[in-house]
Amino acid sequence: MSTSYTDDVRLAHVLADDADSLTMDRFRARDLRVSKKPDMTEVTDADEAVEEAIRRTLGRSRSRDVVQGEEFGVSGTGVRRWIIDPIDGTRNYLRGVPVWATLIALVDEDEVVASCVSAPALGRRWWASKDGGAWTGKSLMSARQCRVSHVDNLSDASLSYSSLTGWADIDKQEQFLALARRVWRTRAYGDFWSYMLLAEGAVDIATEPELAVWDVAALDVIVREAGGLFGGLDGSSGPWAGNALATNGHLHEDVMAFLGHFPDGPTTPTPEGSASVTELTSRRRPPGSPD
């Protein structure tokens, strides 16, 4: 029997409304406070205020659920877990670039089942729930459904990414550049924006080499409910791999041939070796991949 997550999506919108108010109030503020975390990434007073506000609301509305946030860790126990990135794109935020968003995801027994991505400086919001479709609009009452593209050839595909440095860090820069040369178009839209454009059918491939779970949990279910595939470079499904590859589904195996890593096989399958690539990717395909 399927479970409806409609009430959770509605709550995610309430959380996003509160987050939008806080983030927009501090966006481009002259007195914005910025500090460094132990991993040397930046955090602003807005990041912290948003996560604290979301935790307070969830504490009242979903007291039995776990909350995992980028800024304040994990609290609670249970099978349902909210994963929060208060501001995805903090460096954009602190420099006054409007491409940033609050990411809110609900995980039920290790599957992302609902999420909301809110980018108030862009005037955009996206959300999805398991078996409920993926949507974009300004509110639940004013929305259109998201669907991925039908592009099925790399030479016609649009690829979005964040930066090149991460690919060098995992010894995949040459493979990524080879993929970039094969596709029709590349743009570094970056962060959440790449994956939301993919869900809308404006981009066909989105990928990043190094990510935390709060960076991608909310994106996963939106891409899947829009008809795409979301997983890791190891061929796993979901947002758990520490990296991400999302496609419209038609292109997933082709992209994995360039970027995939298979621990029990060749580390870097080559696109030219079509027989071995097909064997590897079919063995490791994420569940639900088209035949």
Image (cartoon, rainbow, N blue to C red):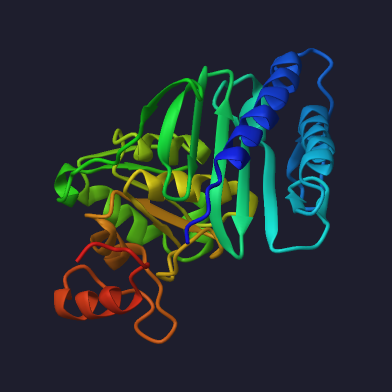
Measured from the top left, where is residue 158 in percent x and y? Answer: 27, 40
Q: Is residue 259 above or below residue 246?
A: below
Which of these two is toward me, 78 or 73? Answer: 78
Q: In the rendered image, which quarter contains the C terminus? A: bottom left
240 or 144: which is nearer to us?
144
Can residue 94 be seen in the rendering of this structure? Answer: no
| Residue 104 spot, x, y in % from top left | 63, 41
In the rendered image, the vertical position of residue 254 relative to residue 193, given as above or below: below
**Residue drawn 42% across and 33% down?**
135
In this rendering, the count of numbered labels is: 0
* 19 sits to left or right of 278: right
In percent of width and height, residue 65 lies at 76, 53
Q: Residue at x 75, y 39 (%)?
A: 42
Residue drawn 75% across and 63% down? 78
Q: Which image quadrant for residue 150?
A: top left
Q: Is residue 26 left or right of residue 288?
A: right
16 horizontally vs 196: left or right: right
Compared with 65, 201 (above or below) is above
Q: Residue pushed farthest bottom?
A: 264
* x and y, in percent, of residue 203 in the image: 31, 38
Residue 184 visible, this orientation: yes
User: Which quadrant holds residue 46?
Assistant: top right
Q: Quadrant of residue 94?
A: top right
Q: Residue at x 20, y 51 (%)?
A: 182
